[in-house]
Image (cartoon, rainbow, N blue to C red):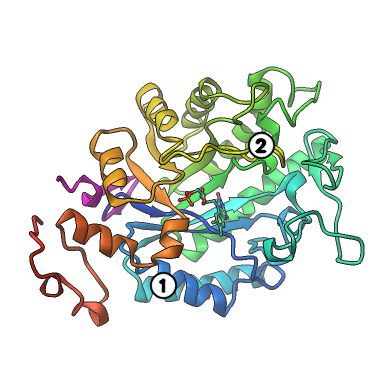
Amino acid sequence: MTNTLFSPYRLADVELPNRIVVSPMCQYSANDGCANDWHLGHLAMLANCGAGLMIVEATHVERHGRITHGCTGLYSDDNEAAMARVIAHCRRVGTAKLGIQIAHAGRKASAQRPWEGGGALKPGADPWETIAPSPIAFGAGWHVPRMATHEDIARVREAFVNAAKRAVRIGFDTIELHYAHGYLAHSFLSPVSNHRIDEYGGSLDNRMRFGREVAQAVRAAVPKSIALGARITGSDWRDDGLTADDAVVYAKALKACGLDYIDVSSGGVTADTRNPTTPGYNVAIAERIKREVGIATRVVGLIVTPALAESIVAEGRADMVAMARSILDDPRWGWHAARELGVDIPRAPQYQRVGPKLWPGAALRA
Ligand SMILES: Cc1cc2nc3c(=O)[nH]c(=O)nc-3n(C[C@H](O)[C@H](O)[C@H](O)COP(=O)(O)O)c2cc1C
């Protein structure tokens, strides 16, 4: 077996020590957008999982752009200070480079935390008005969003820029635009959720406009030394939805806006769509984007075993692999993958007694 998974990778000016990325994972545990001690412990743990890069959960660019009352934000000075504290701690104690995903939930905002049901907030639970390209609900029982006006679009674009500036000040190595999973940007791109007849709807070129404008504006505000990317939708997994062909066109357009990488996810455009359940179900789409667009490509989705992660990178199907549930399940996933692939990796000094000496018979190559 080779050890491509643990080879370094340069993303813009950022030297990632390996190709493993902790996928962003909402914790629904913030206070008015402010990260707290939950995030401190959780993220410090994940920053020591052996991944080269850890991405902080979808962090919202305006208060009404949050999915739930518990989602993190970067829309206030208090939010920025709270996140800065957590990230300074992760930087001190962890081995991973640090990224953040910035997002606007669109018609999936004003929702309950998953453990409260995960549906739309009920009257009495402080729901708020949501916005979307068209006044079409995400699913039965969801809020009908207000159709975003040109003023809304301009405000949200500026909110992305301001959140990105806060992320730069905090010192993140990478910033990721959340353009997937049915949230605002994805809902502009997909013909399933965007029925507009103005310049933001209709043709694919028009439906890409919102994402392109945000990407251009954020790129102008983020120094080139910080890797800026987007998580996009590889497929809506519906006959009337986005396809891999659309994802290739979109990735090209975003590359032209100056983005450094594309992260390929999929699904989530409506409440009733379901993703495939096969291991690495987005890999074929990522492979096309990497080949046809020529941009650094990351892929996510049921990549659970070190052997699969290694083969994706070694065969050049993607440059990086992102993992969510498997790392939540095993917060030392990277250490265990390294052992399985026969390599040793850096650990915090406090943890160095866990190493090759503990693995009788392990044949190390690096
Ligand atoms: C608890 C949890 C929270 C998540 N939150 C986010 C998020 O904030 N942003 C995002 O893009 N994806 C989010 N996701 C999706 C994951 O990042 C990932 O794309 C998905 O779980 C598929 O990868 P996996 O099979 O490795 O879990 C979340 C997933 C989980 C399990």
11 is within the stretch colored magenta: yes
Query: Of 10 and 42, which appears nearest the observer?
Result: 42
Residue at the bottom extreme of this rendering: 350
Q: Residues within 10 Å of mark 2 (few under 14, many from 20)?
A: few
> Is 180 placed above or below 238 here?
below
Task: Return the residue at label 1.
Answer: 45
168 is within the stretch colored magenta: no
Q: Quadrant of the image for the C terminus? A: bottom left
Residue at 35% of width from left, 71% of height from top? 94
Task: Return the residue at label 2.
Answer: 273
Residue at 35% of width from left, 66% of height from top? 49
Residue at the top extreme of this rendering: 203
- 33 vs 129, left or right, is left
- 248 vs 270, left or right, is left
Q: Amino acid at mark 2?
A: Thr
Helix, strand or loop at label 1? It is helix
> Is 81 placed above or below 175 here?
below
Of discs 1 and 2, which sits in the foreground? 2
Residue at 40% of width from left, 29% of height from top? 284
The x, y position of residue 215, in whole percent, is 57, 38
Residue at 23% of width from left, 52% of height from top? 6
Helix, strand or loop at label 2? It is loop
First-in-chain label (1 vs 2): 1
Q: Quadrant of the image for the N terminus? A: top left
Q: Based on the displayed image, in which of its 4 quarters is residue 70 positioned?
A: bottom right
The x, y position of residue 160, in whole percent, is 64, 49
Q: State the extent of the magenta-drawn residues as a range.
A: 1-17
The x, y position of residue 54, in whole percent, is 42, 59
Q: Amino acid at mark 1?
A: Met
